[in-house]
Image (cartoon, helix red, strand yellow):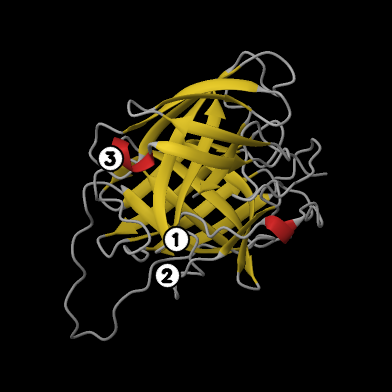
Amino acid sequence: MCTAGPFAGASAKGGRVRGSGGNRLAGADCGDDIIPAAATAASWLMSRSSTTLGDPLKLSFRPTGLATAALAAATLTACGGGGGDSAPPPAPPASAEGAYVGALSGASVNAFQGLVLETGQYWMIYGTVTGGSFLVNGLIQGSGASNNGSFTSADLRDFGATPAAAGTLTGTYTATPSLAGTLTVPGGTVGFNGGAFSTAVYNYNTPALQATIAGTWTLSSTTGDTMNLAIAADGSFAGTTVAGCALAGTATPRPSGRNVYNVSVTYGAAPCLLAGQTVTGVGVYSIVTPTNRQLLVALVNAARTAGSVAVGSR
């Protein structure tokens, strides 16, 4: 069965997603739990694949875990050069830090987009690109170590499952930039292969500005809830969702100077799904079209048992 996270996004126009618990990390596809009619916002890093990077897509959500195909253990590597006379590839950078978009192999889903931060922490959304839309199944988060072109993590969590399922990540990165490797999960392994995407949509290396996200945003969640939040000039916000969940938090630029925001949300009492808890994560602002700006947020709780994605546009 499918599951929805505590602050998970469906669309900037309030599409509703149904969910119920269950660990889908090694299970079959969840079926059509999403009602995508209102899911018309193109998302952060929502480009088609590693071959058509930067094309904005419609955003939908199907909250399930990362389902692996039977006996499909595929390791993808970044594309290399040709003949023996070609120049050697440049040395890998000091770390895998950056933003990536690309394809998955050996899973019931086929695409991912994500960040590797300067601390080694990574955030990855995964799903299926089909019919001009990116159908988001879940969120992967963890912390990894970079070493001369190798990026590894022993604390991967798949937050498409409830509770979150543990796994590992083993990959390689290059100066291209590219990031490729395998996610090892309870049901097997999933290959991933990603590269850079259009800076017209999102530029990781441009410092985030507080003024950029100030103002009112309409956010949607995979719980079917929606909310209007006014982010103040100092990054603080507070509000109550349509379902009656009171929340407050902050969204401020990361001190690293990258185009990422630190986000913290504290929930009030019931009916909030994580009543009394604080979730933290990252936010990304993108220019989807000349008239559509988007804020996408990925959050996990302190115990790393629940995590999800939210999206808003204006």
In this view, the residue in front, 234 or 274, is: 234
Which class describes the residues within 10 Å of circle 2: few (<14), some (14-19), or many (20+)? many
Q: CA distance from mark 2 to mark 1?
A: 7 Å
Is there a contact, CB below 8 Å, between mark 2 and mark 3? no
Residue 265 x/y as whole percent? 52, 24
Label 1 sits on residue: 101
Q: CA distance from mark 2 to mark 3?
A: 25 Å
Q: Quadrant of the N terminus?
A: top right
- Please tell me which residue is depicted at 72% across the width and 34% down the height of the picture: 162
Mark 3 or 1, which is nearer the eye? 3
Which class describes the residues within 10 Å of circle 3: few (<14), some (14-19), or many (20+)? some
Mark 2 or 3, which is nearer the eye? 3
Which mark is first along the chain, 1 or 3? 1
Label 2 sits on residue: 53
Q: Which mark is residue 273?
A: none
Label 3 sits on residue: 209
Residue 119 x/y as whole percent? 32, 34
Which mark is first along the chain, 3 or 2? 2
> Which corner quadrant of the image does residue 234 belong to?
top left
